[in-house]
Image (cartoon, rainbow, N blue to C red):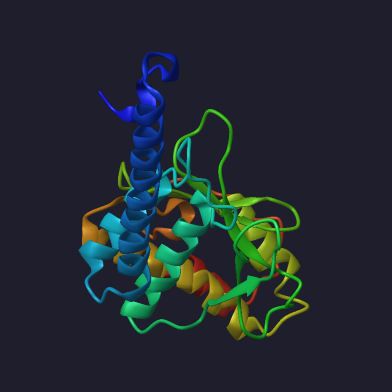
Amino acid sequence: MSNESLNPSSLTTNGRLVAYSDSLKTGLQHGIEFTKLFDQLTDTKDANELLEASTALFDFQMDTEYVVYPHKYNANDYYLIFMSRLLELHSDKDAVLHSREDNLKADTLYQTFPNIDDKEEFHFEQRANQDGAFYVEQNSHQVIFSLNLEEKTMYFNSDTITKLFITEWSDKSDKDEVTNAVDLFIQFGKYLVSDFDFSVDFNMLDASNDKKYILANTNLSEQIMDKLFGL
């Protein structure tokens, strides 16, 4: 039985002091375990270690009854770091990870894409009663894909990709950069399959998918259409 579960009223004064000290040590050791996983997440060159650390951190609760860490990242940030690190391990640099200072917690993390409006920011967020996390456009919270590292699944939302990247942004941003961003999502999915044997539903991005889709914008360039259906 841990000291934290003991009834203080059943302890002598000295026993309470010992229990308090032991509880602090347990909390601090828990924090050290976190830093080991976090170092693994940010430093490892091994893809399997990267997945292991990301999956563990997603459910990791840093705070204990006696030790509370006021500045910490949240579970969604670990998914975002995982995505950025996996792309980095494959020498894919098209998505840029940023941090914004936040005095309430650790810096807020988000991604942007070069040469696409820098107001367009992306991050992961969790949804009530749904497992894993959802990669969304930060302003609209529209889901681009869902990801579950524990279950090893990924699902693309082709409606959002068509609406944001193809219909809305193809006219106001460089078409090469827009299609490169879509391609980055495809490559990320491919890395999940090749490195970890994920089950990835590419939806309409998969050329072998025989389902028919209706596009909102029928005047898309051949380059964009090739990118969408040339997986």
Q: In front here: 167 or 212?
A: 167
* 6 up-or-down from 153: above or below: above
Q: Quadrant of residue 50?
A: bottom left
* 140 up-or-down from 187: above or below: above
Q: Quadrant of residue 150?
A: top left
Q: Residue 143 in the image: x percent, y percent? A: 60, 50
* 59 up-or-down from 156: above or below: above
Query: What number of labels is visible?
Result: 0
Q: In front here: 206 or 91?
A: 91
Q: Is residue 226 left or right of residue 187?
A: right
Which residue is painted at 75% across and 57% down in the image?
139
Which residue is painted at 40% across and 44% down in the image?
24
Quadrant position of the C terminus in the picture: bottom left
Q: Residue 228 in the image: x percent, y percent? A: 50, 66
Q: Is residue 230 visible?
A: yes
Direction top: furthest residue: 10
Quadrant position of the N terminus in the picture: top left
Q: Residue 119 in the image: x percent, y percent? A: 76, 72
Which residue is painted at 35% across and 47% down in the image?
25
Q: Residue 227 in the image: x percent, y percent? A: 49, 73
Q: Is residue 192 visible?
A: no
